[in-house]
Amino acid sequence: MVRRGRLGGPSRTAGQRGRCCVQPTALQLLEDDVRELVRRRRLDPARDEVEVRSLIGEVLDDYDERSLVGGLVPLTDRKEAHRLLVESVAGFGPLQAYLDDPTVEEIWINEPSKVFVARHGRPELTPTFLTEQQVHDLVERMLRSSGRRVDLSSPFVDASLPDGSRLHVTIPDITRRHWAVNIRKFVVAADDLSDMVRLGSLTDHAARFLEAAVASGLNILVAGGTQAGKTTMLNCLAAAVPAHERVVTCEEVFELRVNLRDVASMQCRQASLEGTGEVPLRRLVKEALRMRPGRIIVGEVRQEESLDLLIALNSGLPGMATVHANSAREAVTKMCTLPLLAGPNVSSSFVVPTVASSIDLVVQLGMDADGSRRVREVVALPGRVEGDVVEVADIFVHRDGRLERADGYPPHADRFERYGHDLRELLGRA
């Protein structure tokens, strides 16, 4: 059965579109020759890309010469053959075209015949068809640079690809039958808060306030759903950190791109085959406090590491983090419950007032139906608690499709003044 695309013609993968100009037999022969030479010359395709590209040129030259004397099918499109060989040997095969496409934000594989991508927040089923072995080989190649593994004893894995994209893999018998692969690309859409304004995710008024809040050392929690842009916002907020400060980042997998002079970045480590050597996020937060941080940034809090982060922030160390939540108030509630996972000796009577005094601002993001990401609200925590409820004050709210100034004010006006910011002037004029 031939699967047909929208216009009625047969659908082809990105690789198959190129292979129509190159005989599959010839391409396989060329690929075998290239891989043999890579082994002989002891090249690493991931690190020695220039040498591999040059080697592919040599193999193509040799093939062209041999095809002239007969016995080999001439190449009809040498440039296309070169591209396909680079993708197969130095890249990630049929997925490389999607990784190179700047409009693709995420790639996921539910089964070899179902490869999806997301563009502008919307999922698309691609015409790419893989085999089970291709999926396994691609995952193995992607994990090679990270030193991580996936097997029956460790059926989940998170890793970073060389370009900064995040890889997540789950294998049977956790999944029903096929390997589930997800690649969240690191798409550089914004480097600082001014870029967020340019993209329409934030107003200039709110951006000026947030930049001053970061410079003044307020503790900020970035909240939102999956793909709402939390990591991008955290990167943009980090760009407002004063250049003289030392920043220590803690993440499950490297995703943050903090472009400051003095940055130390750490990521978690999975357990070895013997079940030893695991380094969880909670351990990283504790170790970060011993590294003379001027500010701590945690990629995302999900479990008991939230307690250690709260204790660090409560001790006077400025910091930022992200959390999954559908609203700013839900984010505050979540930060009041996650620390309870740390043990039975941790009680709400300790956690709730600690949250109120440790977190100063919550920036809530959301994704619109058209795929655009926007800041929906910015709320402050004045530090007061009524019963088990943390009081919040709206600073910016989303009204009529636009982020507008509300009537709330953040805590620590003295910090703003110390860093040369008039808080009332900063929030009073739009």
Image (spheres, rainbow, N blue to C red):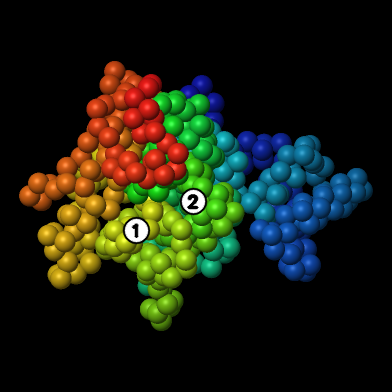
* Residue at the spot 28% in from the left edge and 21% down from the top edge: 399
Q: Earlier in the sequence, mark 2 or mark 1?
A: 2
Please indicate, yes or no, whether residue 284 appears anywhere in the rendered image.
no
Q: Looking at the picture, how far across and down is residue 143, in whole percent?
A: 53, 62
Q: Is residue 305 positioned above or below 376 on the image?
A: below
- Residue 316: which disc? 1
Query: Between residues 213 and 286, which one lies in front from this camera angle?
Result: 213
Q: Position of residue 322 (x, y in %)?
A: 35, 49
The mark tally for this picture is: 2
Q: Is residue 309 above or below residue 222?
A: below
Q: Image point 39% across, 41% down: which residue?
A: 416
Q: Amino acid at mark 1?
A: Gly
Relative to the observer, which residue lies in front, 114 or 384? 384
Numbered tag placed on residue 134 in the rendering:
none
Q: Residue at x 70, y 49 (%)?
A: 86
Q: Residues within 10 Å of mark 1 (few under 14, many from 20)?
A: few
Q: Are marks 2 and 1 in contact (CB under 8 Å)?
A: no
Residue drawn at 51 percent across, 44 percent down: 239
Q: Which residue corresponds to mark 2? A: 256
Q: Is residue 348 visible?
A: yes
Q: Residues within 10 Å of mark 2 (few under 14, many from 20)?
A: many
Q: Nearer the viewer, mark 2 or mark 1?
A: 1
- Residue 370, image x and y in percent? 39, 25
Q: Secondary structure at mark 1?
A: loop
Looking at the rendering, in which quadrant would you find the C terminus?
A: top left
State how far apart marks 2 and 1 are (Cα).
Answer: 23 Å
